[in-house]
Amino acid sequence: MKAKVHVTLKTGVLDPQGKAVQHALHSLGFAEVGEVRQGKFIELETGESDPTKARAAVEEMCKKLLANPVIENYSIEVEG
Amino acid sequence: MKAAVIVFPGSNRDRDMLMALERAAGKPPLAVWHGDADFEPVDLIVVPGGFSYGDYLRAGAMAVHSPIMREVAKRAQAGVPVLGVCNGFQILTEAGLLPGALLRNARLKFVCRDIHMKVETAQSLFTAGYESGQVVRVPVAHHDGNYFADDETLDRLEGEGRVAFRYCTAEGEFDDTANPNGSIRHIAGIYNETKTVLGLMPHPENATDPQLGGTDVAALFDGLVAALH
């Protein structure tokens, strides 16, 4: 069973890369673009067949490695 | 003083650190490979700079789960002094041995130059050779050195005298032009609760030899040797 994880910087944590992308979009003529926040997308095969177990396992993975809770939030999507 | 320098795949300031420690202690420190789960008892553990495991996922994130870091964490908790420099600082925050995190530099550029920092307090194992408020010149070389912690953590660090160093001008003034990476409250280095663990982004090992442009931070190593001999 596949899982998709989005890792994003918490609100209030400066995102200089997002800011640079926003400026680049403005200079390309997308003048209406507001705040841009950049994050990570991780897709993984959980090896589980039960969605509840798969989600619980990925939750543990996020806490232990995939995200840094000091600066990042995460969201998990289990497929199937 | 017997010291150990932890070496990861991708460490690149480990040899500079070994040399700085040997100059101060008069004997060569131990170099400990990341895959080792144990090493002989030492008075000081150093986690050096570099790009351990290619900075994959986040700087320092992978190194935390190496066998050697479990041992380092155990000894740090038992009170063995630990110094983390640059990537070593990132690893110590990822390991939860120091609070906060190091983000991408605010101006997005890799910064490699000499900076000035103020020694906030001489009341520590690492800074006994300095006066509180003394300004020293030291190189930085990093892409992710932008220190961040929430306000509550920052207030606690300041209240407990746990800010070790702050970026400043040569005259000791705090302003944004003297802050190379956007670190919050100009923080360059911090201590843990017992002030036995120090993490900092600048490279003290590269400010100990006149041939490398300065010796302002030799006193940090000399002070450690005096305290831990």
Image (tube, coloured by chain):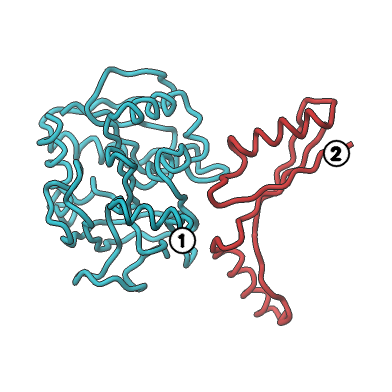
Looking at the image, residue B82 sits to the left or right of residue A55; the answer is left
- Say if A6 sits above or below B18 in the image: below
Q: Which of these two is toward me, B123 or B87?
A: B123
**Tally of numbered tags:** 2
Q: Amino acid at mark 2?
A: Glu
Contact, mark 2 vs mark 1 (Cβ under 8 Å): no
Q: Position of residue B195 (x, y in %)?
A: 27, 42
* B189 up-or-down from B170: above or below: above
Specify the amino acid type for callout 1.
Asn
Position of B133 compared to A16: left or right? left
Q: Chain of mark 2?
A: A
- Residue plotted at (12% across, 37% down): B24
**Residue at 45%, 50% in the rendered image:** B100
Frontmost residue, B59 versus A9? A9
Residue at the (42%, 65%) spot, across then down? B182
Which x, y percent locates residue A3? 78, 38
Query: Which residue position is annotated with label 1?
Result: B105
Q: Colour of chain A?
A: red
Mark 1, Cα crowd under 10 Å, few <14 / some 14-19 / many 20+, is many
Q: Is B29 placed left or right of A60 in the picture? A: left
- For label 1, the SS is loop
User: Where does label 2 land, which residue?
Assistant: A79
> Closest to the observer: B107 or B174?
B174
Instruction: State the image coordinates of residue B224 (x, y, percent, origin top left).
Output: 16, 38
* Residue that extends furthest to the right in the rendered view of this protein: A80
- State the image quarter where residue B68 is shown: top left
In the rendered image of the structure, the colour used to display chain B is cyan
Q: Quadrant of residue B97?
A: top left
Residue B10 vs B155, above or below: the answer is above
Q: CA distance from mark 2 to mark 1?
A: 36 Å
